[in-house]
Amino acid sequence: MTHALITLATLSVLAIGSSTAFAQVFTGRVDVTIEDATGGRMPGVLVELTGPGAQSEVSDAQGQAHFLNMPVGTYTLKASLPGFNPFTNNEVQVATGAATPLMIRLAVAGLPEMINVTAVSPLVDTKRETTTTHLTLEELQNIPTARDPWVVLQTVPTIYVDRVNVGGSESGQQSVYLGKGSVGTDNTWNIDGVPITDMGATGSTPTYFDFDMFQEMAITTGGANAQNPTPGVQLNLVLKKGSNTAHGNVRYYFENEALQGNNLSQSFAQQLDTVAGGLSAACRGSNFTEHCGNRTDSYKDYGFDLGGPLLRDHLWGWGSRGKTNPRNLTLNGDPDETVLENYALKIDGRVSANTRGNFTFFQGNKLKSGRDAGPTRPQETTWDQDGPTKYYKGEGTFVVAHSLFAAARYAYVSSSFQLKPKGGLDADFYKDDAGVWHNSYYFYTTTRPQYYAGGDASYFKDRHELKFGFAWRRTPVDSLSQVTGRHIITFHVEYPKMVAQAQQDYVLRTVGEYANAFVTDTISMNRLTVIAGLRWDRQTSSLAATTAPAVLNVPLLPAVTAKAVQNAYEFSNVAPRVGITYALDHSRKTVARGSYAMFASQLPGTAAAFISPIQPYTYIYYNAVDRNGNRVADLNEIDFAAGVRGSNNVDLAHPGVASTTNTIGAIRAPRTQEMLFGIDRELMPNFGASATVTYRYMDNFLWNPRNGVTPASYVQSGTFTGTFESLGTVSVPLYSALSAQPGYHAEHRPDYHRRYLGFELSLIKRMSNRWMGRAAVASTSWNEYFDSAAAILDKTRTVSPSGDYSNLQSSGPLVNGGTVAVQSAGSGKSDTFLVAPRYQVVANTFYQGPWGLDFAANWLLRQGYAQPFYRSRVNTGDPVVSNKSVLLVSKVDDFRLQRVSSLDARLEKIFKFDRFSAAFDLDVFNLFNRATILQRQLDARVTTFNNILELMNPRILRIGARLFF
């Protein structure tokens, strides 16, 4: 750690080197072309750019000057040459990952000066090679949202999120979200150019954020940029910074029960009270007319940020502190409270005209009480969570020569947290016949540091712009997952009959390492621009030595030791990227574009756990009968004499072996190939439209079948039949392998692929004439295909398939051409199955009215997610996995939840004073007070089958006050 901080400090002060491989994505640029009155190019013109950053250039032989790696914001640009009138523009806007082209004509001295009034990031960018949505500070501050990154993500067409956040009701937990046919493990998170993606929960963020830290967000869903590492959603968070102009913001937002409506009718609430395990006491006390359903008990969000010059023109500082405290009530009234605390500091310095540096510190801590509370998780089974994440980054940018720009970054992330059940670590827990957990739950603790370094550079020559770079990252993970008490979980099966499952601790120690390099050449030929690039990635996951202790009184679960294995997984990929844009008219207001890109999927840092003899969910189970009424299987109630009824990840003939029978074959990273076609049109000044069609073909998927098992090994062993509400009578064939050998083998899944097809249309109105807006519609499909019988191992149709890096124990729906459904997991909603919506509409607008009154609205509409009803723990007699969750419907999306429609609105009053302004906000969320069903009990085994588990929170008013300058 000391070495890391010394490296950071040195880099910040000296600011010498080459930049991270992602620098151009997280900053912006300005491209200036200078002509005289006749249209001739003018070399030798001094061009000065000042604002959030400062830089000067002299135009080259082509009359061009380029300003790279510029922090986002508003700049002043000046151009001067002896004998000509100077040029000044005070409104040059720079956006993340975007190029601002500016055409300047200088008049001979003595003639009227020619001045453009504005030069915003173009609505039509002739060099655009990605599908990226930019959310400016204006939109982040003025549009009513729940103020976290996940609600912003759901406003981007083709991205869909697993929950509905009404006024902050879900801001205490990460959302699961998907993009264009990509899995969640391909999502990436970045702060100011540094990837911070949590590789222990790959695709998620290791921390939470203060919403007022952000200057801008840029969200990329596809395209041919060789700097984009994966086919997933690339979220780039740009922090604010200091400048020569002091700026600050203080805010306080507040909600409580008194500001909340009721979205359940009395009859519906009474019905829920009967079937959902009981609503809250407050709801019953009101005779089911108030305080019913999922609700916000209270919400507070307050903090400040301040930035300005420390030494004018040379040193600038910015800092922030924020706290968010949502407290929610579940359907049955159980509380779920979160406290998010955030601190940030950024220091920028200018060593010389050609050398700049900065240092950033960020800390985010999450304190949570009652995590995962719900109808199936009463208070004693919920988790208390704590653990801070700290982020240190040093950066330098350097103008090497007139046409060569470079920069460097080094970062260290310290991250750890634990989930401790409220029931304590000594209690045994159980799951009753209604599918409800009791007494306690799993304990989990983890440490996940990250180390990052990288560099890139840009070189200009004639029509060519060459970019190249390299980056390296290391992500160790050390974690423990433990069953509390005697390490025995009890499952009721028509109580007092029970199943006693003895489960070993899951101890994990892995190290992920990632290296990449890229090169891109952008060739400009009048209206035609060609961007050709190549990306190389090397990804490895290694296993570190560790030991899992024995389970007492269960001889078949002795201690197990895992030996270190270097580079258990190793992927090396070269991915070509090419994009072409063509301006259809001389004014360049209409641009057609097309691109091809290949992506390698992101290797989870913990993938090497597959090769460890210590596996997750290592257990054996026995029959038991409760004789003393405590509802858990005591040792004297377990029928050891009848023998083991089933097991998972245990070689019953050789328990406790120190080596694994799992093996890894010659595999490559899963691959995505993308073709994108689009057209952009500036309809009028500050108003543009963009239409895009995206096609993706995904293959090279991985699976881990049981050793000695082939498709021919499976024969029908029976049929599951039953009659269920909404489904009627079902008859599902069950299959079992004739025999199996211990262990699993990682290999490519043969003759299997997926396809994605999506269309999106976006309209963007920049702030002018007192209003701005952004609207989009999208229609998407994501399907899987089985090209031969070899693509299916176990023909038993289950609710969802096993993952690429886990043991193959669940086959999935197995419908050729069927919809891909992804079960929300980790921090997600476990009974939510995300499927690509056939329709999605997002829109927001902001209007500056008279008398200092402002009006804003935000609307989301999407198709409901899938309801793949299933029956868990169906015994098939399969030696690979005997109990299976059998799918009861033909297709996963035969049944869908209700469509989601949510409208939020804001009324704001602005008071302007000499040195600052004050704003008072009234935000209304779920304006029409909808009670949309968001989750049902999908498991037909439990007595609460098809019951409602979650409703959309009711209408709520948020009161806010802001002071800013």
Image: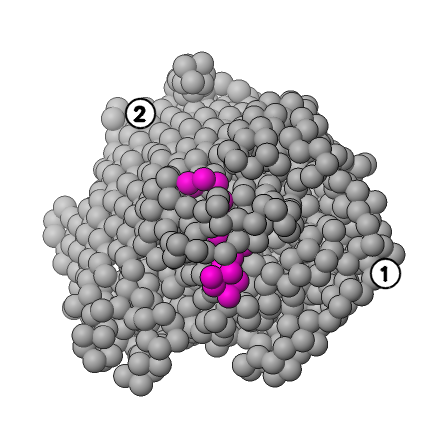
Residue 698 visible at all: yes
What is the x, y in percent for residue 770? 31, 66
Crowding at label 1, few (<14), some or many (≥20) Cα neighbours within 10 Å? few
Return the residue at label 2: 315
Name the residue rendered at 39%, 37% in the picture. 418
Apparent side of residue 742 relative to residue 8 in the rendered image (left or right): right
Quadrant containing the N terminus is top left
Inspect this view and state whether residue 773 appears: no
Residue positioned 68% across, 29% down in the render: 657
Name the kind of residue labelled 2 in the image. Answer: Leu
Say above or below: 467 vs 626: above
Distance from the alpha carbon under mark 2 to that under mark 1: 66 Å
Disc number at residue 789? 1
Nearest the viewer among 18 and 151 is: 151
x%, y% of residue 404?
A: 58, 27
Q: Secondary structure at mark 2?
A: strand
| Label 1 residue SS | helix
The reply to whether the magenta stretch includes residue 431 is no
Please identify the quarter of the rendering in which residue 240 is found: top left
Which segment is the magenta one?
Answer: 484-499
Determine the residue positioned at 60% across, 67% down. Answer: 871
Q: Nearer the viewer, residue 361 or 689?
A: 361
The answer to which of marks 2 and 1 sits earlier in the sequence is: 2
The x and y percentages for residue 954 are: 30, 72
